[in-house]
Image: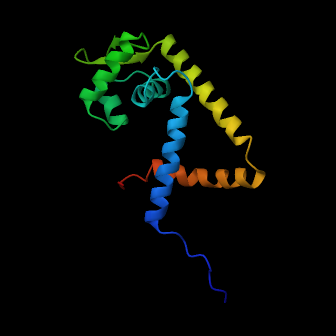
Amino acid sequence: MKKNRHPAPSAETITADLMLALGQIVRRLRSEGNPNELNLSQMGALARLERQGPATTADLARMEAMKPQSMKAILAGLEEDGLVERRPHPTDGRQILFVLTAAGAEERRRRGVAKREWMMAALATFQPEEMRALEAAIPLLRRLGNPPSGGSI
């Protein structure tokens, strides 16, 4: 029986390295486009509205794991820029729904294209075995971002 010459790295080492690498990727993705453009929280709210349709401030705050007051400020800025608009709730007159506008959808599309183009250009420099390694890591990265229900990190 052969002994493993390279023990698995510790969770602490992997955590530090992974956080650094993911931070670099996120910063690079953020920089694709105008630095005065929307921040991650604003883009997250637009993405939720695009994928899941109209939502209240409280619903969006819950989905984005933030305080309703913070989401209210985000939505106010997006509304001012014409990227979302208010609509009355169809069954509860006390609530307001936020809806993605055509300008909001176009902003999401434009930013998505720029990010995909950067990522594809970066990946074009990788060797086939590196591409396979990245492909194999995707399910693990998804698990990190979406832990099983009932569990918290």
Residue occupying the point 66% across, 30% down: 117
Q: Is 79 on the left-hand or right-hand side of 70?
A: right
Estimate the x, y position of residue 96 in percent, counting from the top left.
29, 16
Estimate the x, y position of residue 125 in percent, counting from the top left.
74, 43
View extreme (left): residue: 94
Residue 49 image-quadrant placement: top left
Query: Which residue is nearer to you in this view: 2 or 50?
Result: 2
Q: Is 70 on the left-hand or right-hand side of 124?
A: left
Q: Is residue 121 visible to the viewer in this orientation of the structure?
A: yes
**Total residue callouts:** 0
Name the image colouring.
rainbow
Question: Quadrant location of the N terminus?
Answer: bottom right
Residue 91 image-quadrant placement: top left
Residue occupying the point 65% across, 55% down: 136
Residue occupying the point 60% across, 54% down: 137
View extreme (bottom): residue: 1
Estimate the x, y position of residue 107 in percent, counting from the top left.
52, 18
Q: Is residue 91 visible to the viewer in this orientation of the structure?
A: no
Q: Is 119 on the left-hand or right-hand side of 153?
A: right
The vertical placement of 42 against 84, above or below, is: below
Query: Which residue is nearer to you in this view: 115 or 44?
Result: 115
Residue 120 image-quadrant placement: top right
Residue occupying the point 43% across, 53% down: 148
Question: Quadrant location of the C terminus?
Answer: bottom left
